[in-house]
Image (cartoon, rainbow, N blue to C red):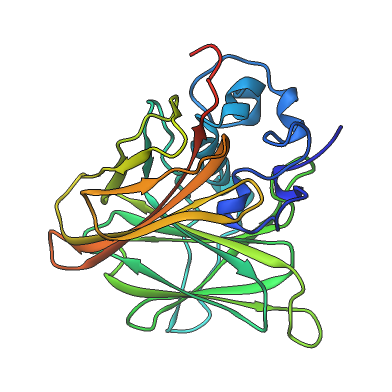
Amino acid sequence: MRAYVARGTQCDWYNPTCLMISGASDNVVPAWSVWANAEARRISDRSDLHHLEVHHTQEYGSWIFSYLGRTTSASLSTQSATDSNVAAASTDLMPLAEAESHVAYSNYSLRGGALGKQVAESITVEGGLTAVTFSLISNSELRVTVVSPSGVAYESSAHASAPGDILQGTTYAVRVENPEAGQWQVLGTPQKRGGKGSGGFMLYAIYEGGLTVELDTDLYQAYTPSSQLPLTVHVNNGQATKATILANLHSRDNKRVANTQGELNGRSMALPQQAGSYTLDLVITGIAADGTRFERTLVTSLSVGEEIAGR
């Protein structure tokens, strides 16, 4: 069988939370995962991941985001400034953080949805970062511009996916070194006649040299149905105040089965009665040490009520 995670029957390919769990085969794992039979634990390509690990989803979330971050300068063309208010985008892209332990962590923010007349997403960037990379993936032809809080516009570089890539489409990327703090706008305009796209998009921003968030949850553990899942989140590489969390748990068919929100720590979530693999997505916001606002998204998978073989 040949199936892509992005082409699962249960959800649209651009849906960030459903992306973790879509696909054909055994109702948990996309069929292509049987191609991967190596034992490597560090994940940067599907050949490093064996089917059992995907099936129980312990390392799946970090793997898909590592894959999305694998972009090199060789695959992107450097953009030159066209006027005084349009900046050149760096093509030295940085991969997302890869998990090397049993915990899930994040140095990224994530968005996704259907294309309308224009993609218009706001991304919070805190102060003191080495760089930030904005990458928008779509199966429609777009013109993508990233605008800084002070109004400087960055035109994106674009490269098409290769045959067999997880997400079939085009990646539009902008990397900005020493970015200013504040709200950045990512604008994507469909180039088809009529101005309305029929596809979807997924947007992620990778923060370099800034805060990372870590969920104190064992990805290798099978959790008891109907139990309470503690949502203990650690903020690393800096201090955060007034931090809040929005947490959603989704089933395999992308139905929200639990959610909670409020102050960052001291919260828990009731797990469902039905055994299976679920996707947990967290949005964490707050104030960094320098007084600027930050945001992070963390998406990972949990096994509920099913013993994890070989662990």
Q: Is residue 26 above or below residue 130?
A: above
Q: Is residue 233 left or right of residue 189?
A: left
Of all residues, the one furthest to the right in this rendering is 1
Q: Position of residue 176 (x, y in %)?
A: 39, 62
Q: Nearer the viewer, residue 113 or 118?
A: 113
Q: Is residue 106 left or right of residue 3?
A: left
Please give the name of the residue rendered at 27% of the width and 57% of the height, measured from the top-left corner.
129
Q: Position of residue 52 (x, y in %)?
A: 62, 21
Of all residues, the one furthest to the top in this rendering is 310
Occupied quadrant, residue 241 = bottom left
Q: Nearer the viewer, residue 162 or 200?
A: 200
Q: Is residue 308 above or below residue 82?
A: above
Residue 178 visible, this angle:
no
Please give the name of the residue rendered at 38% of the width and 26% of the height, measured from the top-left corner.
102
Quadrant (top left, top right, bottom left, bottom right) of the N terminus:
top right
Q: Position of residue 205 (x, y in %)?
A: 44, 58
Q: Position of residue 73 (x, y in %)?
A: 55, 48
